[in-house]
Image (cartoon, grey):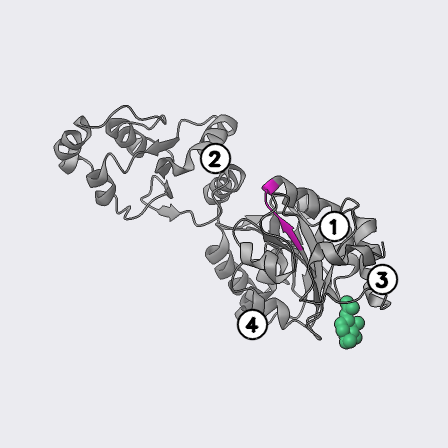
Amino acid sequence: MLLHGCLVLALVCCLGHGAVAWNHVTQQQLQDALDSNGYTLVAYSEALEPEWLAMQETEKDDNIVSFDCHAHSMVCSDLEVASFPAIRLYHRDGRIDRYRGLRKGREIAMFLHRMLRPPYLETDEHLSGVMTMLDDVVVMAHTQPDDWDFFDQFRSLANKYRDRFSFVAAPPVGDTSVLVCYSNIDDVKHTASDVVTAGAMESFINMCAEPLIPDWTEGDDARYRSAGKSIVHYFATSDAEKETYRQEMRALAKKYANTLRFTITDANKDPDSLTKFGLKPEVTQKTGLALENTTTGDIFLFTGHQDVTAPVVEAFIEDITRGNVQPWDRRVRKEQISSHDEL
Ligand SMILES: *[C@@H]1O[C@H](CO)[C@@H](O)[C@H](O)[C@H]1NC(C)=O
């Protein structure tokens, strides 16, 4: 491996360093891990510490190590780790996979499991039910005998997306080749029997993988606002709050999927959005709900004092649809109009 050449230099540069708070492996341990049989998953940088510790705990795996690139910049540049935090999976055959997902223990562990499997799995009828639950997103191809075009496209997409989703080749059903995509977190199943081009297959997979209630990120504005659906915005500050809201609203988001789009905005990352929706960024309680009619540009603020449960939100939506709620007059602040509260 590449490490030997820089051994001396790297040692010199760490002498001045104090004790490292996080339990990084030494250069020799990294070398041993990379030379060992099997694979090595390496995190470079301690920015990953909490997630990494959680993962080392659940995976109970000596092949999961972390290495300090601040202290050993030469070693890291020899390994072509130019910027960090970075997560790399080294395979024995020389293959290196770069992790590009969220820095969350669960996501990283699932990436590892996917990359240690073949790009797609094969199943028979008996196991195909279990296989649909293999991952958060499972793409299953039911290929007709001799439909090589379909299968080739499936296989190349499996190679392209295997780090994010799981792919399964299953026996044929009916009389055409069918692609079925299971989005297990939202418990939604999509079926496409007319995917003839690779592009159509790819959009189908991306559509399926999109969460029912996504995080609103910068750049989504145009996409969501042009979809012709009104948007139910929710503002939250913690992952726990977001998760609670997602679970509570999942059924409602499905029920209104044709006309409404539910999204979550992180009020910490995007404080301007609060003012845009008449909420007060200065208060510590930043949770809030607003419906934006993308056709008219009207914004309806939820001014009730109840907890934001599914029945409460559904009543709010229905009240707006029946014309019982006035759109927010942007000159007036939320607390001043709360006496008009209809709920
Ligand atoms: C948005 O406004 C349009 C035009 O007034 C209306 O037809 C539609 O029902 C409204 N959507 C909602 C969710 O209220």
Crowding at mark 4 (Cα within 10 Å: few <14, some 14-19, many 20+): few
What residue is pinned by disc 1? 249
Residue beneath disc 3: 319
Per the rendered image, the range of residues in magenta is 234-239
The first of marks 1 and 4 along the sequence is 4
Q: Amino acid at mark 4?
A: Thr
CA–CA distance between discs 2 and 1?
27 Å
The kind of secondary structure element at disc 4 is loop
Q: From the image, which quarter does the C terminus lie in?
A: bottom right
Q: Is residue 149 visible?
A: yes
User: Of the residues under marks 2 and 1, which one precedes in the sequence?
Assistant: 2
Q: Does label 1 or label 3 sit earlier along the sequence?
A: 1
Kindly check if marks 3 and 4 are in contact, taking CB atoms under 8 A apart as contact: no
- State left or right for residue 274 relative to residue 37: right
What kind of residue is marked 1? Met
Q: Amino acid at mark 2?
A: Glu
Disc 4 marks which residue? 197
Q: CA distance from mark 1 to mark 3?
A: 17 Å
Distance from Cα at disc 1 to Cα at disc 4? 35 Å
Q: Residue at x 74, y 46 (%)?
A: 248
